[in-house]
Amino acid sequence: MSLLEDRIVYKPFLYPWAYDSWLTQQRIHWLPEEVPLAEDVKDWHKNMTVGEKNLLTQIFRFFVQADVEVNNCYMKHYSQVFKPTEIQMMLSAFSNMETIHIAAYSHLLDTIGMPEVEYEAFLKYGEMKDKYDYMQEWGVETKTDIAKTLAVFGAFTEGLQLFA
């Protein structure tokens, strides 16, 4: 059976590693309000220079949106093509964690008092808007498209963009 073929029965799992990934993700679930931010807020308001705040503001402007786009990839692309139930469960768990990341970054921004207008400010910066537009180009119409989308979102969006 292919990852791209529907299967009507739940078990036996053909991809037990996917179920294991889903289960692990459920066991480590957390919510943004569980992360203490008091020291971060104090640093933001009392210890950071204008230059440091400016740098972080530039990062924050696209950080939330980047994870919105990663979640969209799981929901709009991967869930449409990868069919076995245990794969869908794993993908939905990954997607759910992206929503936690989105809410967590937003919670930080709200807590430090950043205005909501900053959530769309990335659209005014050429490089950030170009990144956003680039992420809209990918799809899953063919197997080649699927492979390219996996590479772009897995390696570049979740990897290089986030951690480089």
Image (cartoon, helix red, strand yellow):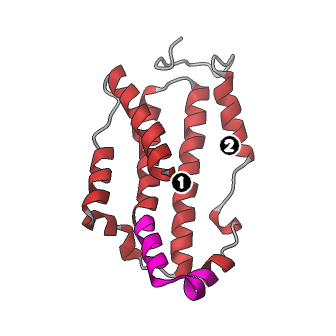
Magenta segment, which residues? Answer: 42-60
Circle 1 sits in a helix, a strand or a loop, which is it? helix
* Image quadrant in which the N terminus is located: top right
Q: Mark 1 points at which residue?
A: 99
**Relative to residue 19, is residue 132 drawn left or right?**
left
Q: Position of residue 52 (x, y in %)?
A: 49, 76
Q: Is the magenta region chiefly helix, strand or loop?
A: helix
Disc marking residue 25: 2
**Relative to residue 64, is residue 84 drawn left or right?**
right
Q: Name the residue at 68% across, 43% down.
A: 25
Which residue occupies the foreground of this view, 14 or 55? 55
How far apart are the alpha carbons under marks 2 and 1? Answer: 13 Å
Q: Is residue 55 shown above or below 69?
A: below
Q: Position of residue 128 (x, y in %)?
A: 32, 58
What amino acid type should be assigned to the residue bearing mark 1?
Thr
Q: Where is residue 76 in the image (x, y as percent from the top left)?
A: 40, 40
What amino acid type should be assigned to the residue bearing mark 2?
Gln
Task: For label 1, count other residues whose C-alpha is less than 10 Å away and answer few (under 14), some (14-19) or many (20+).
Answer: some
Which residue occupies the foreground of this view, 74 or 160? 160
Q: Which of marks 2 and 1 is nearer the N terminus?
A: 2
Q: Name the residue at 56% across, 71% down.
A: 108
